[in-house]
Every structure is written in structure tokens, then in C-alpha cells.
Image: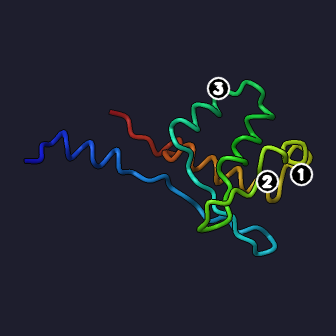
């Protein structure tokens, strides 16, 4: 017989990461996926902000409907030369939505 505990566990442990489709100016689409708890903690613990931003791009950006990451570790130096707006900003906006699904101002006080 199923208990409330079993139901709660099944719901929480069965959750899948969220994702957003980000369309770039040239019509290309990148899928930005929500980090797992382990990935998020590994990334947040990165003290070098440049490495942290590159880690977000490497870990979150995928070719849509595949397991193929758009960026890899070897892209670090090139990622650091991207213009701060444009495609980079679109991707970081989507990553931030995945990192902070409850926007400031939407949170309810008890």
C-alpha cells in the first residue's frame, strides 16, 4: 500500500530538469537546460567568476533534443572573448531563469 511518504518521494525523485529554447538572432536555437543539484553546487562553488560563467554555458547549453553540448571545456578561452550582449546575454538570461525559477517580487511572504 502506498503511503504519503512514498507518493512524495516518487514525485520529488521523479522530477526532470526544466529547459528553455533560446532563439539566436540568426534563427538558430539552443536548448538551455536546468542544472541538477550536484551540477549547480559544483558551479556555485567555483570562486573564479570567469570560470563560473563559462561553466554555466558549458553545462547548460545543448543542441535541441540531443545530449550534445554546444560548448566544451576547450572553449573556455573563446567564451571569454564573446561580446557581453547578443547571444551571450540571451543564453545567460535563460540560464538565470533556470537557476532562479522564482523571480524576485513573485515570492510570497508567509
- Check disc 3: other Cα within 10 Å, few if <14, some if 14-19, many if 20+: few
- Dots 3 and 2: beta carbons under 8 Å? no
Q: Which residue is mark 2?
A: 88
- On screen, residue 51 versus residue 66, left or right, reads right
- Which mark is nearer the camera, 1 or 3? 3
- Check disc 1: other Cα within 10 Å, few if <14, some if 14-19, many if 20+: few
- On screen, residue 28 versus residue 32, left or right, reads right
Real-space CA distance between mark 3 and mark 2, rounded to the nearest whole angstrom: 22 Å
Q: Position of residue 27 (x, y in %)?
A: 76, 75
State how the image is colored.
rainbow
Kindly identify the residue that appears in the image at 35 percent across and 45 percent down: 13
Kindly identify the residue that appears in the image at 58 percent across and 54 percent down: 33
* Relative to 95, residue 53 above or below: above
Q: In the rendered image, which quarter contains the C terminus?
A: top left
User: Which sits earlier in the primary sequence, circle 3 or circle 2?
Assistant: 3
Which sits in the foreground, 101 or 48? Answer: 48
User: Which sits earlier in the primary sequence, circle 1 or circle 2?
Assistant: 1
Q: Position of residue 2 (x, y in %)?
A: 12, 47
Q: Secondary structure at mark 1?
A: loop
Residue 56 image label: none
Real-space CA distance between mark 1 and mark 3, rounded to the nearest whole angstrom: 25 Å
Q: Which residue is mark 1?
A: 83
Kindly identify the residue that appears in the image at 88 percent across and 43 percent down: 80
Q: Which residue is mark 3?
A: 45
* Relative to 70, residue 8 above or below: above
Which sits in the foreground, 109 or 79? Answer: 79
Real-space CA distance between mark 1 and mark 2, rounded to the nearest whole angstrom: 7 Å
Q: Position of residue 94 (x, y in %)?
A: 64, 54
Kindly identify the residue that appears in the image at 70 percent across and 28 percent down: 46
Amino acid at each position: 500500500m502506498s503511503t504519503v511518504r512514498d507518493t512524495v518521494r516518487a514525485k520529488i525523485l521523479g522530477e526532470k530538469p526544466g529547459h528553455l529554447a533560446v532563439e539566436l538572432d540568426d534563427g538558430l536555437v539552443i536548448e538551455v537546460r536546468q542544472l541538477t543539484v550536484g551540477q549547480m553546487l559544483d558551479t556555485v562553488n567555483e570562486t573564479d567568476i570567469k570560470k563560473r560563467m563559462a561553466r554555466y554555458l558549458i553545462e547548460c547549453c545543448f543542441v535541441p533534443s540531443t545530449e550534445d553540448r554546444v560548448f566544451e571545456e576547450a572553449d573556455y578561452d573563446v567564451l571569454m572573448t564573446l561580446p557581453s550582449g547578443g547571444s551571450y546575454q540571451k543564453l545567460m538570461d535563460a540560464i538565470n531563469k533556470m537557476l532562479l525559477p522564482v523571480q524576485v517580487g513573485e515570492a510570497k511572504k508567509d
